[in-house]
Image (spheres, rainbow, N blue to C red):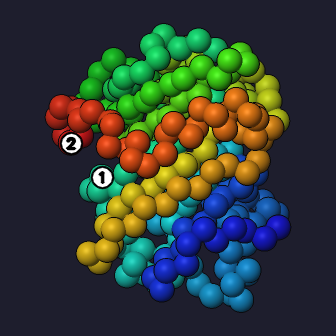
Amino acid sequence: MTLDVHFDHPDFLAVHKPPTIGMHQEGQNIGLVTMLSQQLGGRPLWPVHRLDKVTSGLVLIAKNADTAAALSGLFAKRQVEKYYIALSDKKPAKKQGAVIGDMQKARRGQWKLSTSKLSPAVSQFFSAGLGNGLRLFVVRPHTGKTHQIRVMMKSLGAPILGDSHYGATPADRTYLHALALRFTYQNNAFSFICQPAAGQHFNSPEYNREVEKFTPPWALRWPQLANIGGMHG
């Protein structure tokens, strides 16, 4: 498999991760970082952040340790805008808004959302019906907790289509995709958008019709959130 390098900067790469590859080696299966290193002739690479194995989309990979530290710092300080898309075949408890709460470990490697807000996972979302029994969710996570969006969707009563880990309807893939990133690095603004390639429902006319409504400058439409648990909107 040849990985799609969406953008090549002297210090980092924006890569389109497929939904079948983990970030790191799992048993005999090499991870995205090693695969990309081999694709680029064996040069050393540093992951800046991570996506779940079942999640496709944009991920930043640094070409040196200093850049990895700088970009990771932007994520840690919540200075990177992240936007995801997801599909569900269930009706959510609400069609837009914010989901805020602490996340706790549950059984079988799952996580669950609690009502406390000591160090909460914070996500905003819009959604739109596709007219084919599915609903498109556009999600902006303000924090980067493990399984954050997957747990958020579960808490809404609308688990992500194909996400068997959280009790969703089976499908040809887990329909979660990291769509866009926006940040400033070395006084230069970067904005990347990468549409999904895998998944029959991500290639449907209904999806293509609705997702066109969520393209730049759609990010400017997101309302600001009040300070919650040290989180700045």
Is residue 30 depicted above or below 174 in this figure? Answer: below
Q: Is residue 41 above or below residue 228?
A: below
Image quadrant where one finds the N terminus: bottom right
Identify the residue shown where x is 30% and y is 52%: 78
Q: Are marks 1 and 2 in contact (CB under 8 Å)?
A: yes
The residue lying at 54 percent from left, 23 percent from top is 128
- Pointer 2 residue: 232
Which element type, helix, strand or loop, lies under badge 2?
loop
| Image coordinates for residue 167, horizontal then vertical, percent | 68, 21
Visible in this render: residue 167?
Answer: no
Q: Amino acid at mark 2?
A: His
- Residue 56 at x, y percent in the picture: 65, 50
Q: Residue 75: name its quadrant.
A: bottom left
- Say whether residue 183 is left or right of residue 64: left
- The crowd level at tag 1 (other Cα within 10 Å; few <14, some 14-19, many 20+) is some
Q: Classify 214 as above or below 136.
A: below
Q: Position of residue 2 (x, y in %)?
A: 78, 71
**Residue 81, above or below 35:** above
Q: Give the Cα distance between marks 1 and 2.
A: 8 Å
For mark 1, what is the residue? Answer: 78
Q: Decide which of tag 1 and tag 2 comes sooner along the chain.
A: 1
Which residue sits at x=55%, y=61%?
59
Q: Residues within 10 Å of mark 2 (few under 14, many from 20)?
A: few
> Is residue 105 rendered to the left or right of residue 208?
left
Q: Nearer the viewer, residue 100 or 103?
A: 100
- Secondary structure type for disc 1: loop
Question: Could you tell me which quadrant the C terminus lies in?
Answer: top left
